[in-house]
Amino acid sequence: MNREDWLADAVSELRPLFTHYGETLPLAIKVACGLPSTAKRSGAIGECWADTTSSDGSFNIFISPTLEDPVQIFETLVHELCHATAGAMNHGVNFQRVADAMHLIPVGAGSAPYKATKGNLKFMDVYGSIINSLGEYPHGALTMTTRKKQGTRMMLALCPKCGFKVRLTQHWADKGLPTCGTRMPNGIEVCNAKFILA
């Protein structure tokens, strides 16, 4: 079993519960482990794309690879599936009604408290046996904070006559280093020395 199998099995297990609580999940739902589009900036751990954004009319749900705890993954999946119900793509009253029915509570504040949710006190009573039946989530959490930012590949060149410095890429250095052209301290003479790599 891979991550997507685990998530797809979880959706299958959740369908009758959504129906039990008076909501219907669309038939065409695809779920995968993948970074939500705003994850790096917003810290999002799940995302649901409406059926209107897909050429095959499917809802597409992404669960962040930064998660590995099955309970947190299940909470996130339930949250995103709530978005796939009728009229609940935003965090407004329709979403809130479904989330409440599915045993989620808001953890946010301000104008969009339901933007982040977690299971309420009954969550594990309702879903614990399903989570246990799915087994371990076959995934190791991705740590985004340890990814090194690639440095620029700029090289330092300087004028041997006046000391003026410029930075350029290897590509332009290979084409030939420029001639200085800066005005000398006396304000009259213009430096015409060829730059050298520092």
Image (tube, rainbow, N blue to C red):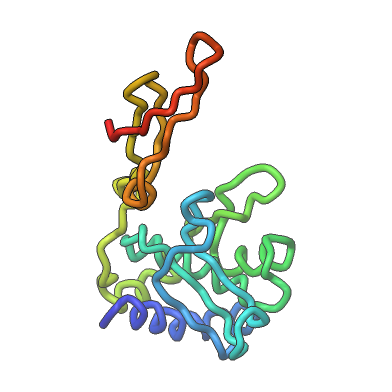
Above-or-below relation of 186 to 138 = above
Above-or-below relation of 30 to 105 = below
Q: Is residue 123 visible?
A: no
| Residue 170 drawn at (x, y percent) | 32, 48
Task: Tell me: 178 left or right of 139.
Answer: right
- Residue in the picture at 26% in, 83% down: 1
Q: How many marks?
A: 0
Task: Tell me: 47 left or right of 53.
Answer: left
- Residue in the picture at 72% in, 68% down: 94
- Residue in the picture at 72% in, 61% down: 92
Q: Residue furthest top?
A: 186
In this rendered view, identify the residue nearer to me: 66 or 9.
Answer: 66
| Residue 144 drawn at (x, y percent) | 35, 51
Q: Quadrant of residue 25?
A: bottom right
Q: Is residue 98 visible?
A: yes
Above-or-below relation of 113 to 73 = above
In this rendered view, identify the residue nearer to me: 128 or 46.
Answer: 46
- Residue in the picture at 41% in, 23% down: 164
Task: Tell me: 52 left or right of 188.
Answer: right
In this rendered view, identify the residue nearer to me: 112 or 140.
Answer: 140
| Residue 67 drawn at (x, y percent) | 36, 60
| Residue 160 drawn at (x, y percent) | 32, 24
Q: Quadrant of the C terminus?
A: top left
In this rendered view, identify the residue nearer to me: 190 or 178.
Answer: 190
